[in-house]
Image: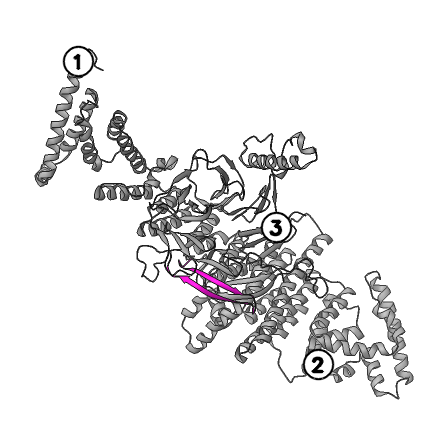
């Protein structure tokens, strides 16, 4: 069933380690069916699902639009314009995360239940972490900022997430020596790296001179600020409480000691910053590990750590897809054949399929997984519960657009059977027409004919009278339509036409053998009419049909035939003989035939 | 306070809600001008089952058709901005065994003409309800052997229904017999019809949309087949609406994610010369003549003479557009991406 047993096991492993979170974040009901040691925990998770999924749905829906736009965007642009395009996509993803964060925050604020409030607040911080990581990846990988702009981006990055602290520092700085800082703050793209370095070097030396001269000796505050400006690590560390995180420390450090840092140098500063900041007191948290992996440009490590820590397929799936479009992931084939991007998209989309309406998004994701997408889609699409006809129609449209004929047939059959059980013969026929299912059309026709034989009249005339070209779908259906026509002709007293039709139904073998008796019995009133309707030839034909019918029965059957049956046959024989006599006379006379 | 815009059907089942949104007036400028006109959620209420169709009964009440077979009237209390369920007809639509837990059949369409409400469903049943009356005024069981997809009023006592074997039927509710007074069907394949709407002024012009995305225009005074068939969408056409005050304009939305605006106002080919003269009497004449040219626009099958402008109003289509509504210059539509779009300058 799965493309590869190892793939299956791997995905199960990932799921097993993240039960709670996965169910929590994606609201997958099926997880509740898996055995959990603490069942009360499951109940709480169940409650979370409904709440969490409400606000996350916006994330799923909007990111789906961005994802599709990215897949469809032509690679006509090369180089810089393509990069700008990809950066814009990345920014779009981030703005969706932020919008969700705001919604979640609003929900947290307005929640009266404290448990609910804490739930929402937790989700807000998770989303915030996601945006933090994504932002860093955008700077380092998508935009691939070079030395110079790199620090500016990192500054914005930190500022965005730790804004108030930085503002304080800036205020202090800007109140003193504004002119000295003008050159520094005006770092723009217009300046080349060398120009910037020279200017910075010059400024740095000036600061150093001021410190050494003891200009700030009288004011310890100013002195420490000057030391900070010079990138003195200890001075900066002293203000640890102002900086909430080691990466804030890192960027601050770089700002004052190495503003023209190159991307590849980041790893060293990052590692030492983390060590210095944490100082052996606390161990790195998952978020720290992820950010560190990013600074080290270990893409696969980042993705792996995110998969484990976040346990939210949404994040890794979309980020990896974007990085893949940046051509940063070599076709790093996982040894079971599928590449990283596809694997993650398949997992994410499979999760969507458990949701009663988000499955529609999943379809598009499968479409963009070239190797296994189709197989996954075929398996998942048949398992969507079809509680209304409209939903079934949507599923069918998806299957038809992808030439998934087997699925079309099977879904139509399910819907037709349901309709048949509910006695909706017209609906059942409509589904068989859609699937061009001749066998089922035959089944429905037999049902109509059975009803006719039992009740003596047709039900659902509006359907049978208006079959149109769909009549040709199956022989039995054609017979039904024609048989009804015979009745109509008889009702309109167009006897000769009716007679001709009746005969044709038997001779052209449109009528099933089981129905011949009924047809011949229908011929009786025509044979008994005052005027002769059947011609000699037609009468001979009818007789032949009758004999074929009776001859076909074995002796045993004849013995089992009750009196009614034998009487019928006798009556027919008599009527046919009488008609033959009359018609021979009629045709023999001068006016005849 | 903006007038409530047409409501959006939510496709999901566990947390379906009926919501009322306010779309601000043109004169209502937001804090910094940016959020002017962004729809604001006023109130919402839980709904059991998928919302299949809904319509305003009057200024305050909305009738909602559910996939569970229930038909509910919700009341919007404007003073405190809340919604409450006012009246409900349980299992108005059901399959064979009404009392079975899953015996309900989806109610697929509802149309109102205060105080009368007509509903149709997957059970092929037509119900006539009256607001504030507990029992149905009239029920036609097995009105259709297939699923009835939509219903609309033709005249005050006559309704139009479309079904899944491509038939358009007229029912006269004054008559006691349970047969349609007229049946129209498509030529060729009996493609299911999903939506129907009647021209606001010319009551004999009817538009239907089919599963193959085809738009059919019918003249119910003559013949049993459509007057024109227009190849439109690439998938099911879910809704078709004539603009209520500007009926030269027609709107259709589809599973293929597009929303088309059909404009026949430009196809008024030749204006009679006396229109250019002034005077009261000519005004009277011109009104009639314009009506006539409008009629011919929809019923004409001479493509060289009358041109129709067709525009797709959605630039980047992805998922299905399930529902739309129009009033004046305002267009509202909802998609399967769980988004509602409002366009308040339709004819700009």
**Residue identified by numbered label 2:** A276
Secondary structure at numbered mark 3:
loop
Classify A125 as above or below B215: below
Residue at the extreme top of the image, as rendered: A590
Q: Is residue A177 left or right of residue A267?
A: right
Residue A288 in percent (x, y) is at 63, 75
A410 within the magenta span: no
**Residue identified by numbered label 3:** B328
Mark 2 or mark 1: which comes first in sequence? 2
Q: Where does the C terminus of chain A fall, quadrant-wise?
A: top left
**Residue identified by numbered label 1:** A588
Residue at the extreme front of the image, as rendered: B280
Secondary structure at numbered mark 2:
helix
Q: CA distance from mark 3 to mark 1?
A: 79 Å
Q: Is residue B146 left or right of residue A328?
A: left
Q: Nearer the viewer, residue B86 or A532?
A: B86
Q: Have a look at marks 2 and 3 and say if they share a chain.
A: no
Q: Could you tell me what secondary structure mostly forms the magenta stretch?
A: strand
The residue segment tinted magenta is B67-91
Secondary structure at numbered mark 1:
helix
Q: Nearer the viewer, residue B236 or A243?
A: B236
Classify A409 as above or below B87: above
Q: Callout 2: residue from which chain?
A: A
Residue A506 in percent (x, y) is at 24, 30
């Amino acid at each position: 069933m799965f493309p590869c047993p190892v793939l299956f096991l791997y995905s199960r492993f990932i799921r097993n380690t993240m039960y709670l979170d996965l169910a929590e974040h994606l609201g997958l009901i099926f997880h509740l069916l898996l055995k959990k040691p603490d069942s009360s925990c499951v109940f709480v998770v169940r409650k979370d699902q409904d709440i969490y999924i409400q606000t996350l749905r916006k994330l799923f829906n909007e990111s789906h639009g961005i994802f599709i736009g990215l897949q469809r965007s032509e690679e006509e642009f090369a180089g810089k314009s393509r990069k700008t395009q990809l950066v814009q996509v990345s920014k779009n993803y981030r703005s969706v995360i932020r919008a969700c964060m705001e919604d979640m925050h609003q929900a947290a604020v307005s929640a009266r239940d404290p448990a609910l409030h804490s739930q929402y607040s937790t989700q807000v911080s998770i989303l915030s972490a996601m945006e933090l990581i994504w932002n860093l990846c955008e700077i380092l990988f998508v935009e691939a900022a070079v030395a110079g702009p790199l620090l500016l981006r990192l500054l914005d990055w930190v500022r965005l997430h730790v804004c108030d602290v930085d503002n304080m520092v800036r205020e202090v700085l800007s109140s003193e020596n504004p002119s000295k800082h003008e050159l520094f703050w005006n770092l723009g793209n217009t300046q080349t790296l060398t120009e910037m370095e020279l200017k910075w070097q010059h400024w740095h030396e000036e600061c150093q001179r001021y410190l050494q001269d003891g200009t700030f000796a009288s004011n310890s505050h100013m002195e420490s600020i000057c030391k900070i400006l010079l990138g003195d690590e200890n001075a900066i560390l002293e203000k640890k409480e102002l900086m909430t995180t080691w990466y804030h420390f890192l960027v601050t450090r770089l700002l004052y000691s190495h503003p023209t840092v190159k991307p590849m140098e980041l790893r060293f500063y990052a590692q030492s910053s983390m060590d210095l900041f944490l100082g052996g007191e606390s161990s790195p948290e998952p978020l720290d590990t992820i950010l560190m992996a990013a600074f080290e440009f270990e893409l696969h490590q980042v993705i792996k750590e995110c998969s484990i820590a976040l346990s939210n397929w949404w994040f890794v799936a979309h980020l990896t897809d974007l990085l893949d479009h940046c051509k940063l992931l070599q076709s790093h084939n996982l040894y079971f054949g599928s590449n990283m991007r596809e694997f993650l998209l398949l997992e994410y989309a499979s999760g969507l399929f458990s949701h009663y309406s988000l499955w529609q998004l999943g379809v598009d994701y499968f479409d963009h997984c070239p190797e296994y997408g189709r197989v996954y889609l075929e398996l998942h699409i048949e398992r969507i519960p079809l509680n209304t006809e409209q939903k079934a129609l949507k599923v069918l449209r998806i299957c038809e657009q992808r030439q998934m004929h087997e699925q079309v047939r099977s879904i139509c059959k399910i819907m037709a059977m349901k309709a048949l059980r509910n006695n909706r013969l017209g609906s059942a026929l409509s589904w068989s027409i859609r699937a061009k299912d001749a066998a089922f059309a035959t089944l429905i026709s037999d049902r109509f004919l059975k009803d006719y034989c039992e009740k003596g009249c047709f039900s659902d005339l509006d359907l049978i009278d208006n079959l149109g070209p769909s009549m040709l779908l199956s022989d039995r259906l054609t017979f039904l339509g024609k048989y009804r026509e015979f009745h109509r002709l008889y009702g309109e007293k167009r006897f000769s036409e009716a007679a001709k039709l009746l005969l044709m139904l038997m001779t052209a073998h449109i009528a099933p053998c089981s129905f011949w008796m009924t047809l011949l019995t229908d011929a009786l009133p025509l044979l008994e009419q005052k005027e002769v309707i059947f011609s000699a030839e037609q009468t001979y034909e009818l007789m032949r049909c009758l004999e074929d019918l009776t001859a076909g029965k074995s002796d045993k059957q004849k013995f089992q035939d009750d009196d009614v049956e034998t009487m019928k046959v006798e009556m027919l024989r008599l009527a046919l003989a009488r008609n033959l006599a009359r018609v021979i006379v009629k045709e023999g006379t001068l006016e005849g035939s | 306070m903006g007038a409530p815009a047409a409501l959006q059907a939510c496709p999901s089942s566990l947390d379906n809600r009926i919501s009322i949104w306010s779309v601000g007036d043109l004169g209502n400028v937001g804090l910094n001008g940016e959020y002017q006109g962004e729809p604001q959620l006023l109130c919402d209420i839980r709904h059991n089952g998928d919302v299949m169709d809904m319509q305003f009964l009057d200024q305050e009440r909305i009738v909602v058709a559910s996939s569970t077979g229930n038909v509910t009237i919700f009341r919007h209390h404007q003073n405190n901005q809340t919604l409450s369920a006012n009246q409900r007809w349980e299992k108005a639509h059901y399959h064979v065994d009404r009392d079975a837990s899953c015996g309900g059949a989806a109610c697929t369409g509802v149309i109102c003409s205060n105080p009368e409400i007509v509903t149709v469903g997957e059970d092929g049943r037509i119900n006539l309800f009256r607001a504030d009356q507990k029992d149905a005024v009239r029920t036609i069981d097995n009105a259709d052997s297939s699923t009835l997809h939509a219903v609309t009023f033709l005249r005050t006592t006559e309704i139009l229904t479309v079904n899944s074997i491509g038939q358009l039927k007229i029912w006269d509710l004054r008559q006691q017999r349970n047969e349609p007074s007229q049946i129209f069907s498509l030529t060729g394949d009996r493609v299911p019809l999903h939506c129907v709407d009647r021209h606001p002024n010319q009551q004999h012009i009817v538009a239907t949309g089919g599963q193959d995305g085809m738009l059919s225009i019918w003249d119910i005074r003559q013949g049993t087949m459509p007057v024109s068939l227009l190849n439109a969408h690439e998938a099911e056409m879910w809704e078709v609406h004539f603009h209520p005050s500007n009926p030269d304009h027609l709107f259709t939305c589809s599973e293929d994610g597009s929303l088309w605006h059909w404009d026949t106002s430009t196809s008024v080919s030749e204006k009679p010369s006396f229109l250019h003269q002034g005077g009261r009497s000519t005004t009277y004449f011109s009104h009639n003549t314009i009506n006539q040219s409008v009629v011919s626009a929809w019923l004409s099958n001479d493509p060289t003479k009358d041109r129709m402008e067709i525009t797709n109003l959605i630039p980047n289509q992805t998922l299905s557009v399930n529902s739309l509504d129009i009033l004046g210059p305002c267009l509202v539509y909802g998609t399967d991406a769980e988004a509602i779009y409002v366009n308040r300058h339709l004819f700009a």
